[in-house]
Image (spheres, helix red, strand yellow):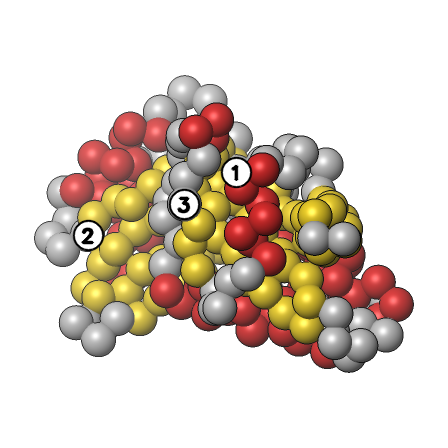
């Protein structure tokens, strides 16, 4: 079974190797490691994609991490998007290949790129937010979606009553025709979106908007 583990660790040589060794000793087979954020206080946040045999419980990985000095687990969960992390460059290649539908193709790959459960692109038509494109598991737009089209910058969004365990983030962009749209992504149960992830989201959505023809 595939799992995604997000950990905070000292940004010094040897920390990542120690983490990998601890996870391996606990029974995990590491598929990929991606640096999510470098912080000014000497801390890094990494995502680790790994496979666990059926007899190994995720709690064993948390225990192994906590035995290492300076390492803290942010989040661990099943990873249903597949066995490979999709890099931002691959996302760009996906939407650049179809410039007529660049925003739609970006939405399709956002779950893998940002490890989110769903993504939606929405427009405003006659003052009403309308779904432009969404991934299969995305919900219908809630009434609060009206505010999603007025985001001054990429940001986390207020939790919704019916989605109390879901963290949401969004960004706004303008295409070549001056049309404003928004892209919103969500994770069920976390982890929270980091500042670096919000910046990446804003950048890649703006790039897709510039490609859209």
| SS at badge 1 | loop
Instruction: Identify the mark nearer the N-term, 3 or 2.
Output: 2
| SS at badge 3 | loop
Q: Is 20 left, or right, of 155 in this rendering?
A: left
Q: Is 25 left, or right, of 204 in this rendering?
A: left
Instruction: Identify the mark nearer the N-term, 3 or 1.
Output: 1
Horizontal and vertical percent position of residue 69 = 11, 53
Give the number of the mark in front: 3 or 2.
3
Residue under label 2? 71
Is residue 134 positioned above or below 195 on the image? Answer: above
Dot label at residue 158: 3
Please state, as top left, top right, bottom left or bottom right, where the C terminus lies in the image: bottom right
Residue under the image location 44 percent in, 60 percent down? 155
Residue under the image location 37 percent in, 59 percent down? 194
Q: Is 30 left, or right, of 128 in this rendering?
A: left
The residue nearer to you, when weighing 102 against 85, is 102
Horizontal and vertical percent position of residue 169 = 48, 52
């Amino acid at each position: 079974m595939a799992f995604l583990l997000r950990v905070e660790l000292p940004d010094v040589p040897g920390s990542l190797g120690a983490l990998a060794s601890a996870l391996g000793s606990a029974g995990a087979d590491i598929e990929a490691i991606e640096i999510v954020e470098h912080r000014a206080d000497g801390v890094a946040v990494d995502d680790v994609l790994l496979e666990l045999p059926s007899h190994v419980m995720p709690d064993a990985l948390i225990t192994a991490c906590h035995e290492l000095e300076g390492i803290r687990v942010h989040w661990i969960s099943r990873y249903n998007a597949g066995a490979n992390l999709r890099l931002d460059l691959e996302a760009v290649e996906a939407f650049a290949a179809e410039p007529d539908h660049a925003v739609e193709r970006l939405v399709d790959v956002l779950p893998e790129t940002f490890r989110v459960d769903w993504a939606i692109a929405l427009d405003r038509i006659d003052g009403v937010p309308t779904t432009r494109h969404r991934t299969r598991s995305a919900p219908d737009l809630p009434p609060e979606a009206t505010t999603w089209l007025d985001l001054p910058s990429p940001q986390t969004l207020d939790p919704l009553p019916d989605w109390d365990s879901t963290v949401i983030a969004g960004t706004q962009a303008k295409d070549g025709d001056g049309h404003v749209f928004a892209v919103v992504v969500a994770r069920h149960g976390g982890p929270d979106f980091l500042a670096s992830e919000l910046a990446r989201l804003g950048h890649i959505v703006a790039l897709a908007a510039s490609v859209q023809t």
